[in-house]
Image (cartoon, helix red, strand yellow):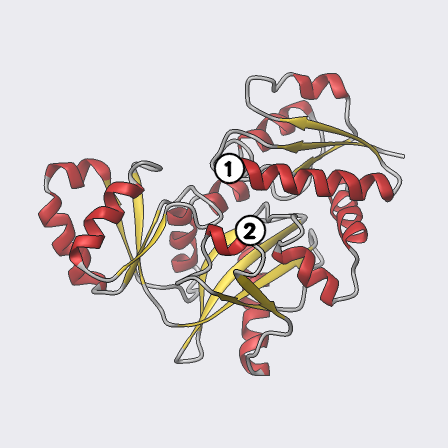
Amino acid sequence: MEKVLVLMGGTSAEREVSLRSGNSVAKALLEAGYYVDMLDFKGDNINEIIGYSPDVVFIALHGENGEDGRIQGYLDILGIPYTSSGLTASAIGMNKILTKKMLLLDDIPTAKFYIIKKADFALNSAKEIKRLIDKLDFPLVIKAPSQGSSIGTYIVKDKNSLITAINDGFNYDSELLAEQYITGVEITAAVIGNDKLEVLPLIEITSTNEFYDYESKYTKGKCEHIIPARIDDKVMNKVNSLTERIYKLLGCKGFARVDFIIGRDNIPYVLEINTVPGMTDMSLVPDAAKAKGISYIELCDRIVKLALK
């Protein structure tokens, strides 16, 4: 049986989530009959990957150095197969600004946005704020484009909180994504496959917090995953079609998750794509798979087999 090395942990703000994902994946793959090693990947121990001589690497890293194409490029050089998408799709998918630009090029519906650059904001913050408000108005959303799990994301309703959100966001990135806030139903679509794709049952997400933030995602009782999502068949078919379109547009492989807001106009607006989705006991992809009759062990096995192809 193939030897799988599970990369987990890392140094990003999502380290704890990654450890939970990695441990769950490793346990499942052991039960599926694989020989499994685990490596808490911190960047400075990158050469240890070679020492394990894996047949395939299961990437359970989230955020910087795990989801942004860097580890993918290194594994490409080594010639070691790995789960999820390759370098280019990972780099684009991790950066919310690049993703938005790709969506616009392909006429995929997404919220209006504005890019705030740290250098421009430092030079003339009043001018940048005026431009931003003129383009989007309130409420709006400020996002650190290279973070996941809603880290560095702020819903802003007035000018004072806008300045605070921008300054906080610059702690994560030198560019920020400001986005029109769309009121609606939050939906996520998990997809599995390389060339032949399968979109899993859509999940509607509700949260006890103002939005589906980090606390909601990983604290029991703070959110609810509703399957099937409470949307009509026409909207569901549109979400499924857009999910496959985005997956192919970016050149994704293995599995991914696309997040949407269904606006009051019944249009599915794409929020972002996650090329290395969480695999914890509270994560969305395992829940969607379960609704399709795919066990967690089978899901992990299928992801490994897709990587080996």
Q: Position of residue 163 (x, y in %)?
A: 19, 48
Q: Is residue 171 shown left or right of residue 119? A: right
Residue 140 in the image: above or below residue 60: below
Q: Nearer the viewer, mark 1 or mark 2?
A: 2
Residue that extends furthest to the front in the rendered view of this protein = 221
Q: Is residue 38 left or right of residue 135?
A: right
Q: Quadrant of residue 89?
A: top right
242 relative to 175, above or below: below
Question: Is 106 left or right of 202, judged from the image as shown?
Answer: left
Mark 1 or 2 closer to N-term?
A: 1
- Rounded to the nearest angstrom, the CA distance separating label 1 from label 2 is 22 Å
Q: What type is the residue that disc 1 sits on?
A: Asp
Instruction: Give, as a three-letter code, the residue at label 2.
Output: Tyr
Residue 137 badge: none
Q: 237 and 8: which one is in front?
A: 8
Q: Decide: is 72 above or below 196.
A: above
Quarter holding the N terminus? Answer: top right
The residue that mark 1 highlights is 68
Q: Residues within 10 Å of mark 2 (few under 14, many from 20)?
A: some
Q: Residue 236's x, y, as percent? A: 58, 76
Give the quarter of the figure containing the C terminus: top right
Q: How far across and how far down the image is residue 64, in percent? A: 49, 34
Q: Assign a secondary structure to mark 1.
A: loop
Q: Secondary structure at mark 2?
A: helix
Q: Quadrant of residue 188?
A: bottom right
Task: Decide which of 245, 35 is in the foreground and name it.
Answer: 35
- What residue is at 15 percent from the left and 62 percent from the top? 134
Above/below status of 206 relative to 127? below
Q: Residue at x 74, y 47 (%)?
A: 303
Q: Which residue is mark 2?
A: 218
